[in-house]
Image: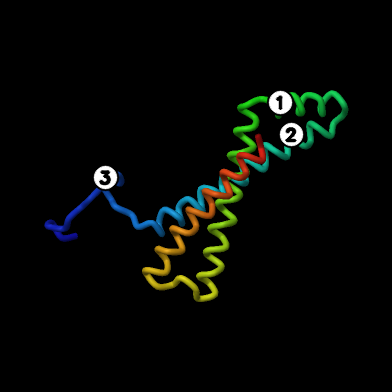
């Protein structure tokens, strides 16, 4: 290893391009969707266990924290789907240039933000 080689170990000072943020958030939203789906499947199982379980889940889902949880899971799923469509478009040859990738990344954030807000309106 060269002794005069620059080393930057502070991840907070590295300026990532917008395409990197889209990709990282795509992975994070995938993990969040899987974890959230597990929680929602547990609630579904509880609601199908009988009248008492259904009433318990119904009461739980009327609370603000539960609505935030549902909204967060749906937001992760929405973002993951929008970013996935971007990746599929890139697989078909669209947005492969540097500027095209940047435009597609911005469009991903805008479309996902609009859909996430609409999802929040629907949940409440």
Disc on the earlier residue, 1 or 3: 3
Q: Is residue 47 left or right of residue 102?
A: right
Which residue, given by chain and number where applicable, does mark 1 sit on?
A: 60
Name, please, the residue furthest toward the bottom: 93
Q: Which mark is residue 10?
A: 3
Question: Badge 2 local density, few (<14 within 10 Å), some, or many (20+)?
Answer: some
- Label 1–label 2 contact, CB within 8 A: yes
Which is closer to the viewer, label 3 or label 2? 2
Counting from the top left corner in percent of width and height, residue 26 is at 51, 53
Q: From the viewer's perspective, tell me whether residue 105 is left or right of residue 43.
A: left
Q: CA distance from mark 1 to mark 2?
A: 9 Å
Mark 3 to mark 2: distance in Å? 41 Å
Name which residue lies at 50% across and 70% down.
90
Q: Is residue 117 above or below residue 15?
A: above
Q: Residue at x 61, y 27 (%)?
A: 65
- The local crowd at label 1, few if under 14, some if 14 to 19, many if 20 or more residues have their Cα within 10 Å, is some
Q: Secondary structure at mark 1?
A: helix
The residue positioned 48% from the left and 53% from the top of the image is 109
Residue at the extreme left of the image, as rendered: 4
Q: Secondary structure at mark 2?
A: helix
Q: Which mark is residue 77?
A: none
Marks 1, 2: nearer the viewer: 1
Q: CA distance from mark 1 to mark 3?
A: 43 Å
Dot 3 lies on which element? loop
The residue indicated by pointer 2 is 43
* Residue at the limit of the structure toward the right, as seen here: 51
């Amino acid at each position: 290893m060269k002794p005069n080689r620059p080393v930057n170990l502070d991840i907070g000072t590295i300026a990532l391009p917008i395409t990197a943020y889209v990709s990282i958030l795509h992975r994070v939203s995938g993990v969040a969707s899987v974890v959230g789906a597990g929680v929602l499947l547990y609630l579904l199982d509880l609601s199908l266990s009988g009248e008492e379980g259904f009433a318990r889940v119904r009461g739980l889902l009327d609370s603000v924290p539960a609505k935030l949880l549902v909204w967060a899971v749906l937001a992760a799923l929405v973002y993951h789907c929008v970013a996935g469509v971007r990746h599929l478009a890139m697989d078909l040859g669209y947005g492969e240039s540097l500027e095209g990738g940047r435009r597609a990344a911005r469009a991903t954030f805008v479309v996902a933000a609009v859909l996430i807000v609409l999802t929040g309106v629907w949940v409440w």
